[in-house]
Image: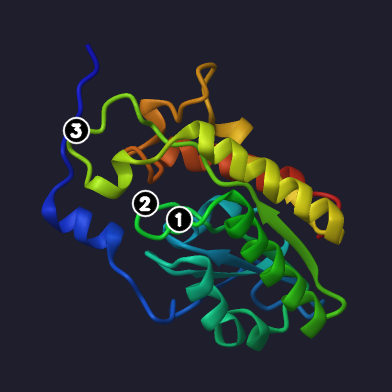
Amino acid sequence: MEQWTPLSKTLWKLLTKKKKFSGSRCFNNRKGKEVKQKRIVMFGDSLTDYFPMQKLTDIDAEFINSGAAGNTVPEMKARVRYDVLSFQPDIVIMQGGANDFQMSLYRGSKVVAGQLADLGEWIRRELPEVKIYIESLYPAYTKRLGNMPSWAKEKSNEEIRRINEEIRRQCEERRIEYVDMYSRLAGEDGELPLAYTVDGIHLTDAAYDIVSECLHELLKDIV
């Protein structure tokens, strides 16, 4: 029988805390070198905010983590000048939409996907030379969420897949690169494996290894 350990109040408060601005963190992997590195902004919600940046230290680039826990896509748009454009990045890796997929906020797959694609397109208009990637939504563990708050219980991997298909379609129409993280993280049953999540939504270190592996593959011929 699967065992579920409830999160402590302190950890849960940390995971769900909203921030107006992320306080973007910079990670330069070639300190002291004169050759200009590619500058990469990772832009998203808590799934980006809590990404262990040390997993990317072997990539010859300057990384800026501009994730902000609790953000919806409109909230990401509200801070994009401060947390993305101000850094003049060469590459932007966007991840978002998980917090928009709440029963009180959710307006359908086309709306969420359209907001993400619109934001990517807007960044490209402001920075014509930037390379933009938009990640899929990640899978959720929905089999046993008794200790989760109500918003997490409403997560449905079937609906997440519909959102992802719409993101993929809209990215293709707008010539934005789509990154399928869902398939990399999902088990054979389409669920996020229990070993990959602390609460059904947020990721463990083992899951971030998978995300890191995908990012390495994505960037190997670019930086």
| Rendered position, 111 above or below 41 | above
Question: How many residues crowd mark 1 within 10 Å: few (<14), some (14–19), many (20+)?
Answer: some
Count how many numbered circles sit on residues in the image. Answer: 3
The kind of secondary structure element at disc 3 is loop
Spatial CA span between label 1 and label 3: 22 Å
Can residue 77 be seen here? The reply is: yes
Residue projecting furthest to the left: 9
Query: Image point 54% across, 16% down: which residue?
Result: 188
From the viewer's side, name the closer residue of 156 and 221. Answer: 156
Question: How many residues crowd mark 3 within 10 Å: few (<14), some (14–19), many (20+)?
Answer: few
Q: x and y percent of residue 100 in the render? A: 46, 58
Spatial CA span between label 1 and label 2: 5 Å
Give the residue at mark 3. 146
State which quarter of the image contains the N terminus: top left
Query: Image point 52% across, 24% down: which residue?
Result: 190
From the viewer's side, name the closer residue of 215 and 83. Answer: 83
Give the residue at mark 2. 103
Q: Are the residues at dot 3 and dot 2 in contact (C-beta closer than 8 Å)?
A: no
The kind of secondary structure element at disc 2 is loop
Tell which circle, 3 or 2, labels the residue nearer the N-terminal end.
2
Q: x and y percent of residue 60 in the render? A: 73, 61
At label 2, which amino acid type do we have? Answer: Met
Residue 106 circle label = 1
| Rendered position, 163 above or below 53 | above
| Mark in front: 1 vs 3 | 1
- Is 93 on the left or on the right of 139, as rendered? right
State which quarter of the image contains the C terminus: bottom right
